[in-house]
Image (tube, rainbow, N blue to C red):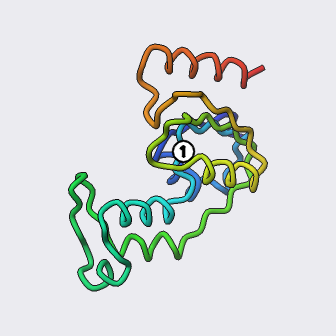
Amino acid sequence: MMALYSANSIGAYFSLLSLADMPIEKAYFISPIVNMEKLIMDMMHWAGVTEDELQEKGIIATEFGEALSWEYLAWVRSHPVSWHIPTEILYGSEDNLQSMETVKNFAAGCGAGLTIMEQGEHWFHTEEQLQFLREWLIRCEK
């Protein structure tokens, strides 16, 4: 049995898809993308792109450096997440990629524990954020 597993951001999303049936005792996700369709739809909104435009063009480059892909959106929609592994989530209140509501809904739906760091960002990178992350991991292991 794989005792522990951790992932962050998009790595957590791909873990949700690929490891849902694995014998994992506990998963730890940091700033996870738990709803890729919602993120893509948000990115489309930020870029002023409609579903019809994306479907017609296939791929659209954005000003913020990400390419939107109709094929990828369709793939995401055809591969829903089903997660039932005991999980702890660390989320920053200032995460700009996945909304707090989205993460809370995911956590509630799968029974995951959720810790929110006030003023935390999507990427835990400051000394304060990294210290919070270290302390969170220690608390979760007890």
Query: Residue at point 58% right, 36% down?
Result: 91
Query: Residue at point 69% right, 56% down?
Result: 83
Q: Which residue is mark 1?
A: 32
Q: How many marks?
A: 1
The image quarter containing residue 49 is bottom left
**Residue type, numbered disc 1:** Pro
Q: Count neighbours of disc 1 (C-alpha within 10 A) and say few if under 14, some if 14 to 19, many if 20 or more.
A: many
Query: Residue at point 67% right, 62% down?
Result: 82
The image quarter containing residue 75 is bottom left
Where is residue 33 drawn, in percent x and y? 52, 50
47 displayed left or right of 88: left
Where is residue 50 drawn, in percent x and y? 35, 76
Q: Is residue 25 above or below residue 77?
A: above
Where is residue 108 drawn, in percent x and y? 76, 51
The image quarter containing residue 24 is top right
Residue 66 or residue 118, whichever sits in front: 118
Q: Is residue 30 above or below residue 34?
A: above
Q: Give the quarter of the figure containing the C terminus.
A: top right
Local SS, label 1:
loop
Q: Give the quarter of the figure containing the N terminus.
A: top right
Query: Residue at point 52% right, 28% down?
Result: 119
Q: Is residue 125 above or below residue 67?
A: above
41 displayed left or right of 110: left
Residue 48 or residue 11, whichever sits in front: 48
110 displayed left or right of 89: right
Where is residue 117 drawn, in percent x and y? 60, 28
